[in-house]
Image (cartoon, rainbow, N blue to C red):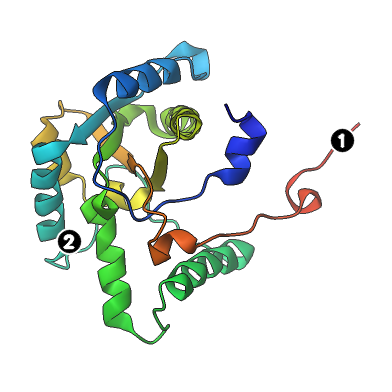
Amino acid sequence: MMSLSEILNSRYSVRAFKKDPVEQHILEEIFSAAQRAPSNCNVQPWQTYVVSGAKKDQLKNLLIGTVMKQQPPEPDFNWKVAYEGIHRERQFGSANALYSSMGIAREDKMKRNMAMLRNWAFFDAPHVAFFTMDTYLDIMGAVDVGIYAQTLTLLLKERGIDSCMQGALGQFPQPVREFLELPEGRGVLFGMSFGYADDNADANKTRTDRAALQDAVSFVS
């Protein structure tokens, strides 16, 4: 079994999956273990929906139909941050790494749009998770859900299961809320496609770098 350091060094955002589903008992073991994730005051605000099979395909079609209408996103939470400075440079660097590995030129807007649309097709993954929480929890709840999602992706990788965290899955929440019959006051924060990686796909050759320690951490003593 891989150590945590090995998992962190080997995982990456997978954007092409094999069709093989993860067995239900393995899903239940992993999601049960993720319940140990820490949260502020132990409030455990996450309400997670794992969608698979025919239901996943139905939801995919609903989302793609919504996105294809070319209406602006209407997220339940604040996804309107415009990156600046170094953050914008990293954003562009990430996009450039992905499209370069896929052989898509910067000026080829059509192919880039088609690649972007695959977010809402869940990159053909056999499973997708939607992370929801009560909207009144705001930033505190979002922090907790982020910790939970990170815990989950590492537990998945420990079992050889890959994933891609997707803010895009929180941009058009209305069809998701209706499909999952979310109660009033519950919002979709983001989502995660997951399954077994297709190692032959060009998209999965993408790798991104990380900031140097001195640029990210200050030791004060």
Q: Position of residue 117 (x, y in %)?
A: 25, 63
Say which residue appears at 29% left-offset and 77% top-offset. Answer: 111
Q: Position of residue 211 (x, y in %)?
A: 70, 55
Q: Quadrant of residue 85?
A: bottom right
Name the residue tied to disc 1: 220
Please name the amino acid that badge 2 sits on: Val
Say which residue appears at 29% left-offset and 56% top-offset. Answer: 119
Nearer to us in this view, 134 or 197: 197
Relative to 195, residue 32 above or below: above
Please name the amino acid that badge 1 sits on: Val
Res 37 seen here? yes
Q: Earlier in the sequence, mark 2 or mark 1?
A: 2
Name the residue tied to disc 2: 67
Q: Position of residue 3 (x, y in %)?
A: 63, 29
Relative to 116, residue 33 above or below: above
Nearer to us in this view, 85 or 47: 47
User: On the rendered image, what quadrant is the N terminus found in?
Assistant: top right
Relative to 144, residue 16 above or below: below
Q: CA distance from mark 2 to mark 1?
A: 47 Å
Q: Which disc number belongs to residue 149?
A: none
Say which residue appears at 75% left-offset and 54% top-offset. Answer: 212
Q: Helix, strand or loop at disc 1?
A: loop
Relative to 93, residue 1 above or below: above
Q: Quadrant of residue 178?
A: top left
Neighbours of disc 2 within 10 Å: few (<14), some (14-19), many (20+): some
Q: Position of residue 142 (x, y in %)?
A: 43, 33
Nearer to us in this view, 139 or 90: 90
Say which residue appears at 9% left-offset and 40% top-offset. Answer: 54
